[in-house]
Image (cartoon, rainbow, N blue to C red):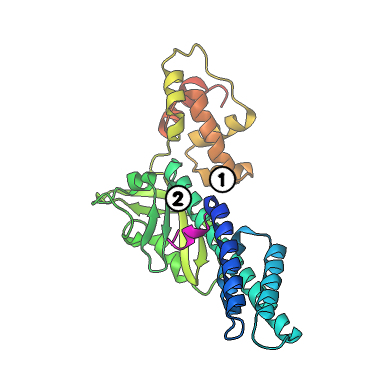
Amino acid sequence: MLPLERLWDKRNRTVILLVSAAIIALIAAVDWWIEPYESLGFLYLFPIMTMAVFLPRWVVVVIGIGCAILAERFSPLEMSYVRLGFEALALGGCGLFVREVILNRQREWEAKENLRVLAETTPAAIVTVDGRGFIELANRAAIETLLPRDGQLIGNPIAAFLPELHHALRWEDAPPFRTSMQCLGHRGNGEVFTADVWFSTYNERGAPKVAAIIVDMSEEKAPPFMDAALESSTSLPQEKPAALSARETEVLRLLVQGLANKEIAGHMDVSESVVKNTLQQLFFKTGVRTRSQLVRVALEHYRNVL
């Protein structure tokens, strides 16, 4: 949030309203004192714009009309209802305009802050890319996945890590869209890996940008938050294999045949995400972390079922 916008922080509400009311009273007093010489009615604009953010729209309109009446009452000119109407429209309209601008900026800032917090706390690798193809936001999981040489992803070109994702920025004339793809990724240490990328394009102030979630699929693993549960399950001797549902059995059967997630989804007529969720359930039930370990367990303990 910019320093000036901090003025409209919710914690400052009472102070801003009291100070703005005092300024309006001061302007009215000075305007009354110099009534024969000059009009200071235009100065009401500033306290109205300052306090409008903290007030409902109808209150802003009422204050605008009230200040217009004060400006007309202490004006050295003769009373004019037309001028009064224009003054009320100007004061109230400016207050409403500033109110909407500041509130929209606050919502935008809060959304970015929430996105930053979410990106930092999620175990998934998340990056955002600006219109020139440079990474402008990356969480720790993204750094651990892409392993930049200097330890920093922000400011580096995304093409150095995920060339296919860079191509999404070339469709500037097309409307925003969301999709996923599987492509080859390049780590900073020179290692090549298979990546599943879910990304969406969007425009921010006329500039095209991309937000993406990156998953290393070179050897599909159970998510990090399941490690403790898996360790506890594998530390105990399993007298008999866990019971599997019909869907889990079918996924396991097709996995043993060497099919990829997309092919399994096609055979079962379900979405690929359903297959991935089922695999995570199998990881948990069997106490393994990788696909290869899951195949081994399937052949050792579920051969008859399959």
Depth order, front residue of 232/217? 232
For label 1, the SS is: helix
Check residue 116 in the rendering and tell me which mark sits there, or answer none: 2
* Viewer can see residue 28: yes
The N terminus sits in image quarter: bottom left
Residue type highlighted by circle 1? Glu
Residue found at the far bottom of this picture: 78
Check residue 179 in the rendering and tell me which mark sits there, or answer none: none
Occupied quadrant, residue 140: top left
x, y percent for residue 86 = 69, 82
> Is 271 located above or below residue 137 in the figure?
above
The residues colored magenta run 1-9
The C terminus sits in image quarter: top right
x, y percent for residue 179 = 53, 57
Depth order, front residue of 183/36? 36
Residue type highlighted by circle 2? Arg
> Is 96 located above or below residue 300 in the figure?
below
Residue 158 painted magenta: no
x, y percent for residue 129 = 41, 61
Crowding at dot 1, Cα within 10 Å, few <14 / some 14-19 / many 20+, comes out as some
* Viewer can see residue 180: no
Name the residue located 61 percent from the left edge and 74 percent from the top edge: 94
Of the two numbered discs 1 and 2 on the same chain, state the one appearing first in sequence. Answer: 2
Name the residue located 70 percent from the left edge and 69 percent from the top edge: 61
> Is 46 located above or below residue 119 in the figure?
below
Check residue 272 in the rendering and tell me which mark sits there, or answer none: 1
